[in-house]
Image: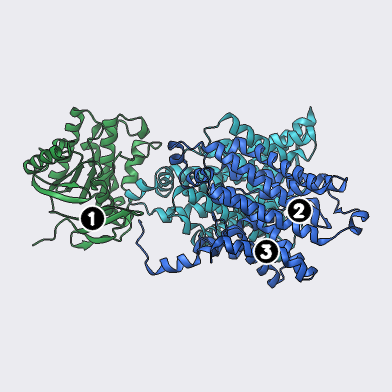
Chain colours: A green, B blue, C cyan
Amino acid sequence: MTAPALELRGVQAAYGDAQVLWGVDWQVNPGEVVAVVGPNGAGKSTALRVVAGLLRPLRGEVWFHGERIDGLSPDQVVERGVALVPEGRRLFAHMTVLENLLLGGYTARARSVRRQTLREVFELFPVLAERSGQTAGTLSGGQQQMLAIARGLMSRPRLLLLDEPSLGLAPVVVQQVYEVVRRIALQGVTVVVVEQNVFPVLHHAPRGYLMAGGRVVAQGSAETLVRTEVVQRSYVGG
Amino acid sequence: MNPSVAAAAAVALAAALPWVAGDAAVNWGLLVLLQVTVAQSWNLLGGYGGQVNLGHAAFFGIGALVTRGLWVQGTPVVGALVAGSAAAAVAGLVVGLPSLRLRGPYFAIGTLAMAEILRIVVGTTLPEVSALPSDLITGYRLVPRYYLALALAVLSTAVVWRVSCSRFGMGLVAIREDEWVAETVGVDTYRHKLAALLLSAALAGAAGGAFGYYHLSFYPQFVFSPVWTFDAVLMVFLGGIGTVWGPPVGATFFVLLREALALRLTELHVLVFGAVFVVVVLTLPGGLVDVARVLRAMRVRRPQPA
Amino acid sequence: MEVWLQNVTFGALVGGLYGLAAVGLALVFGVLRMLNVAHGELIMLGGYATFWLFTLWGTDPYVSLLVAAPALFAVGVGLYEGLFGRLVRLHEESKVQLSILIGFGLALVLHALAILLWTADDRAVTAEYAGRVLRAGPLVVPLTRLAGLGVAFAVLGALQLFLQRTDAGRAIRATAEDWEAAFLMGIPVRRVYRTAFALGSALAGVAGSLVAVSDAISPAIGLSWTLKALIVVVLAGLGSIFGTFVAGVLLGVAESAAAFALGGAFREVVGLVLFVAVLAVRPQGLFGRGL
């Protein structure tokens, strides 16, 4: 049996004295597209930050293709093949589209094939090729999200983590974003998508986790999550 | 021991010193008390309000020159001291009004610039040694100067204590912890910082005034030396920044250590204490008054975010 | 009129060095969010490096740049590893403030050390061309000062190219703009911090060498150079290297104009007046942006 692409075992994490994660378990198989949904403050983004190495867990382990990666620094995690496209995109707004992309392919592993990756990325996002000389801050919201994803792809990840890619985008644009996610997954990249609610990911992720209060409260098919989420909402009155 | 009991005991001991000890000890005690005021005045704004003042020497120096000038010309020393203290507060306004409105390092830059510029200007305009006229030297007695220093040390510590348990003090601490949050919960951050600066500058000016009253002769430029600022910062960190009792502890420790090492040469003094300072800042951010807590905490280290 | 012109020219030549000093400081602040107020003392060290190379072995001061810059780069690495690098995990506000305090302590220590090692005397590199001047009509321009301006300009141009065109340079700019996002690109942020700090120190080394030839050095020059650099950075912000260079030239001109019109003591006061004026006019502050 091959090792899972990503596995979280009992991960607990805190910002200073405020504990946010209380034992999170995920298991994501190679090539899967998995959704992680849940309300604001559920700990979804924190879990992604732990995977990316930006936050060290208090307890628990993170495994990536059979290698333990908690404790590695973020740049080492990227070098292993994990790319996080963070919430709010976090583009280098004063730098050009091309510079953002080049930075995405900064690691030694990515740099050796950077030209080719750039060609592939431009094929996937033709609009970025047209605007490569423009500063990132001047792009539209949808284009910025595309650039953020493209920048993540430049590191040639085996695992792509997307934190709320639909945030602040028009429904049409959200569809475009998820069309791109589908095409990325077709190339064999494992994808974990975090969203506030399940509807944007419904048709794109066959399976997922529902998180609340720093724990996984349900997992299963998209339909299961929808049902649980609706029940949960009626409980908390959201 | 209860801190207020300890404080009363310390003040009583200090007040008794001239009755039981010789001139050398009194002189030494005076230096400690003077430094308590210098440290406390920096602590008020730096320790509670979190504003880094790199030009404390300017306030000290202005207080020293103004007080000494007026006193030598015949003003009663208390009046001269108040004038010196007020002059220092005005200087505080000049640099604080524009720079405290902004977050970031502006205040540190402004105070550093002011102190250095005053030092240079004073050095070029008053190049002669300031020595006391002979009639004042004949009447010179150490004990009244000692009690003046004691009074200022008690006053400055009382002010810091009073501030630390007031709404004003809580506002300052809120600013130190997070200025944005302080503002959103309704603290007028600008006025808080300005008020703390005025108090701090006035106290530093008074300490300078006491120095001008105490010292027989010095170059006017000397009281503007950045070493005064450095010593203040060092004593505050050594004792415990943002606490009432840290600065007196730090000042005592500092003067003791300096006398024990007999660091007459300014360069050696700075070299040794510079190293002490860096070690304290990097390894003991709570200062000496925090040692017990740090030792406890070292047993239960918690992981930090990366 | 001619005296005025002469003064302005002089001021501009000195100001170029202010700009160079300020760029080093701004680089460190922009990337690490730390203010190294011992920057002037690093300039002083660069000056002594050049002075001793010249005095002991007769090394040409412009050749000794090639030693002073790497030497100060190494000093920067050491200071980062030993002192400033220990602050990087702190919260933004305390990071700035502790860096200022540590820098202040460091400044006094380096000052004291220089006095103990090399005495408090003024020193200058007296190369055989030190006294030569160029004449352009009524203007007299000392050769070393002109060369200083040229070297400063060239070094800043090279820095600009490095930051814009190379992966390492882009990594520095990315870290300045958003260190967390830079981490997610696989950029080793701590190493970038160290490089940026060392580069800032190397720039101080270059500035120090130029000061040693065109002016005099002593252990005491550090603080005043730090102040010039700080004021230039406040004037220019962190926007661009050449903006900072121009602001440096402006400060130099303003200083010599004030000294000429009002007397020598006012040279130093100009900086404070400008500082207060800039804060009053642009209260939103100028430290905002990345490189």
Residue C42: where, in percent of width, then height?
Answer: 61, 55
Residue C166 or residue C120, whichever sits in front: C120
Q: CA distance from mark 2 to mark 3?
A: 21 Å
Q: Which of the numbered marks, if any, corresponds to residue A90?
A: none
Question: Residue under circle 3?
Answer: B12
Residue annotated with mark 1 = A22
The answer to whether residue A51 is left or right of residue C39 is left
Q: Residues within 10 Å of mark 3 (few under 14, many from 20)?
A: few
Find numbered disc 2 in the image and state the secondary structure of the residue it sits on: helix
Q: Amino acid at mark 2?
A: Ala
Front disc: 2 or 3: 3
For mark 3, name the chain: B
Q: Chain of mark 2?
A: B
In the image, residue B77 lies at what x, y percent? 81, 49
Q: Residue at x 11, y 61 (%)?
A: A2
Q: Nearer the viewer, mark 2 or mark 1?
A: 2
Where residue C205 appears, as percent x and y from the top left, is 60, 54
Q: Secondary structure at mark 3?
A: helix
Say which residue appears at 66% left-offset and 69% top-offset.
B257
Residue at the disc numbered 2: B210
Badge 1 density bin: few <14, some 14–19, many ≥20, Cα 10 Å: some
Q: CA distance from mark 2 to mark 1?
A: 59 Å
A69 vs C134: above or below: below
Is the residue marked by circle 2 packed among few (<14), some (14-19), or many (20+) residues within 10 Å? many
